[in-house]
Amino acid sequence: GAVVSQHPSRVICKSGTSVKIECRSLDFQATTMFWYRQFPKQSLMLMATSNEGSKATYEQGVEKDKFLINHASLTLSTLTVTSAHPEDSSFYICSARDGVANYGYTFGSGTRLTVV
Amino acid sequence: DAKTTQPPSMDCAEGRAANLPCNHSTISGNEYVYWYRQIHSQGPQYIIHGLKNNETNEMASLIITEDRKSSTLILPHATLRDTAVYYCIVRVATSGTYKYIFGTGTRLKVLA
């Protein structure tokens, strides 16, 4: 089945620095990927839709200048958390859809970001 | 703007069937219902999806009511490994693609 790889799985960074998270579709091409954020004991919240070769579409309330998304190829989308603060500490998850397969979107294993 | 509602938690005895309900009363005629589960600190895992007919695969069965306003995910013989948060999702069409809006999910605990 389709595999989505996310890297890194865990990252700790200092307040004020930027962190980049990668999301790769390993065995299929994905023109669209999605980025979610999940706080402890809460559900996944959709942050943005990443479109290959064009600008990302952000959900209401998500700061596009803080969460930079780049989808430069059909197999890679990146999320950069800029000027990170402790309140940005969260579990970030990406997903993508294999257009050929008859099942839903495949999710990455997530990235645990801790800002200290 | 979640389009689904689920009970927050359920318990199920190991080996018994787990029946997880979901209400999606505002679902549109061409919107699919998807079920995923999330084991602690992992990404969600696809289980099953359907439009209006009942569906079955190696993991579970999905029963959708005739009016499509609710559905039930059935794990026929729950095991301890099935302990997870189960999400019922209605896929929402947007700008040429579809996105998932997650509800709060049901935390299923399978008891030995």
Image (cartoon, coloured by chain):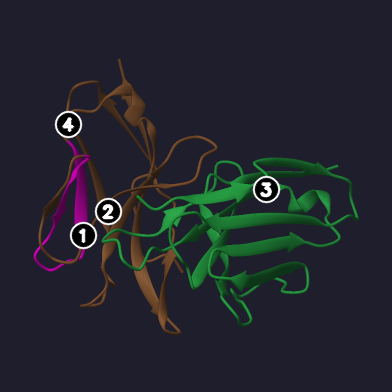
Chain colours: A green, B brown
Q: Chain of mark 2?
A: B
Q: Is residue A10 left or right of residue B29?
A: right
Q: Earlier in the sequence, mark 1 or mark 2?
A: 2
- Badge 1 amino acid: Ser
Q: Quadrant of residue B13?
A: top left
Which residue shows up at 50% across the image and 35% down it?
Answer: B40
Q: Earlier in the sequence, mark 2 or mark 4?
A: 4
Q: Is residue B74 magenta?
A: yes
Number of the label disc, if any, that sits on residue B70: 1
> Residue A113's spot in the image, x, y percent?
72, 45
Rounded to the nearest angstrom, the CA distance separating label 2 from label 3 is: 27 Å
In this rendering, do the residues under marks 2 and 3 share a single chain? no
> Residue B1's spot in the image, x, y percent?
46, 69
- Residue tagged 4: B17
Which residue shows up at 86% across the image and 60% down it?
Answer: A83
* Front residue of this view, candidates A33 and A36: A33
